[in-house]
Image (cartoon, coloured by chain):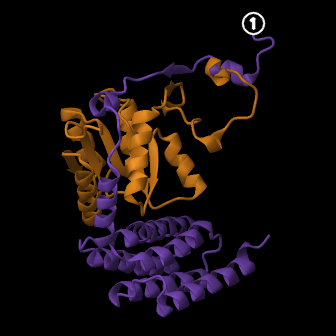
Chain colours: A purple, B orange
């Protein structure tokens, strides 16, 4: 019965394609949103004064605490769970920084997030980098070193990148 | 002629208060007036079951029920009033593995944070103007995951609509 059919053909015989009613199109019609409104909403993102600092500080505190807790356990599974939580907090800082006038926070958090997501060796070197990042994150949020081009932020990201490069050469090189 | 947004209901699910306010404001400036805010997946799903919505914009990682679990409930729960509702999933994660997880859970569009207003608008336009077919199989229910240009399939043609 299945002669001439591939495995995928057999699998796909049970797949149903459905075209749902396009409710949004029916309600919204055509024509898009005027560009001036898109620009206005972008201007709001760039200039909003919504208070984010307390939330940023909370995430940075969480990272330090989770890093300490992680170093106190020898259980590999527990360490992985802590790493996931550390990554989540870094991700929140990366996601929110630029949207609340802290672009440098997004920039260094992006570096740290890539590092945390790719790290395989949770050792002293790893925790030192995380600590350097969280100290840097605190600096750029509390001291308002918000501009990516500021010398402080440039030095910080350079230092962070160098430390990660050294770590990768030592532990992640194939 | 422009989109008529005043009658469209949008459910925004975000646990971080400043981000919730920001997204609400951005949508409001764009012209959406019927915006409901939820702090997490549980609250969102409860609202969705009671009142429905035309569009869900949800964060991924939240305290309590997160975005992935919410999408799964909306798509597959027997009490879901509209398993086809478009869902934009937002997250600060952007590595390939995470994006694939999000795609496989049944989201309609992915929006990496931080985002620009234009990014959000582009996702909305995509949903309205180029809606995806839904796939129903034993393993998956959700929008067709093959639509994107970078997902171009170069293997043998097996479906009728592949030939188009």
> B126 and B100: which one is in front?
B126
> B82 and A172: which one is in front?
B82
Residue A74's spot in the image, x, y percent? 56, 75
Quadrant of res A63 = bottom left
Q: In which quarter of the image is the N terminus of chain B?
A: top left
Q: In which quarter of the image is the C terminus of chain B?
A: top right
Q: Can residue A7 be seen in this view?
A: yes
The residue positioned 67% from the left and 38% from the top of the image is B152
> Furthest-top residue in view?
A1
B57 on left or right of B147: left
Residue A12's spot in the image, x, y percent? 63, 21
Residue behind mark 1: A1
In the rendered view, tell whether residue B65 sits above or below residue A142.
above
The residue positioned 23% from the left and 61% from the top of the image is B21
- Label count reads 1
The residue positioned 69% from the left and 84% from the top of the image is A166
């Amino acid at each position: 019965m299945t002669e001439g059919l591939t495995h995928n053909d057999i699998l796909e015989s049970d797949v149903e394609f459905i075209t749902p009613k396009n409710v949004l199109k029916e309600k919204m019609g055509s024509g898009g949103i005027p560009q001036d409104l898109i620009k206005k909403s972008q201007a709001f993102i760039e200039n909003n004064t919504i208070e984010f600092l307390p939330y940023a500080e909370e995430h940075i505190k969480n990272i330090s605490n989770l890093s300490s807790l992680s170093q106190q356990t020898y259980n590999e599974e527990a360490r992985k769970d802590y790493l996931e939580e550390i990554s989540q907090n870094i991700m929140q800082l990366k996601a929110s920084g630029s949207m609340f006038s802290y672009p440098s926070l997004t920039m260094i958090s992006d570096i740290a997030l890539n590092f945390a997501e790719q790290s395989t060796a949770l050792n002293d070197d790893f925790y030192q980098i995380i600590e350097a990042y969280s100290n840097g994150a605190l600096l750029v949020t509390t001291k308002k070193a918000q501009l990516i081009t500021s010398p402080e932020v440039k030095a910080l990201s350079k230092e962070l990148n160098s430390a990660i490069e050294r770590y990768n050469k030592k532990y992640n090189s194939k | 002629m422009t989109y008529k947004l005043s009658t469209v209901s949008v459910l925004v699910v975000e646990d971080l208060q400043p981000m919730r306010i920001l997204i609400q404001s951005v949508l409001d400036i764009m012209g959406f007036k019927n915006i409901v805010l939820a702090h997490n997946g549980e609250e969102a799903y409860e609202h969705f079951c009671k009142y429905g919505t035309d569009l869900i914009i949800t964060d991924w990682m939240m305290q309590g029920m997160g975005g992935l679990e919410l999408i799964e409930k909306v798509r597959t729960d027997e009490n879901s009033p509209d398993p086809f509702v478009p869902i934009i999933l937002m997250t600060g994660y952007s590595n390939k593995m995470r994006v694939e997880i999000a795609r496989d859970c049944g989201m309609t569009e992915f929006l990496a944070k931080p985002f620009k207003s234009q990014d959000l608008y582009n996702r909305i336009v995509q949903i309205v103007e180029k809606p995806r077919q839904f796939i129903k199989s034993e393993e998956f229910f959700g929008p067709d995951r093959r639509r994107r240009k970078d997902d171009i399939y170069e293997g043998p043609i097996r479906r009728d609509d592949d030939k188009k």
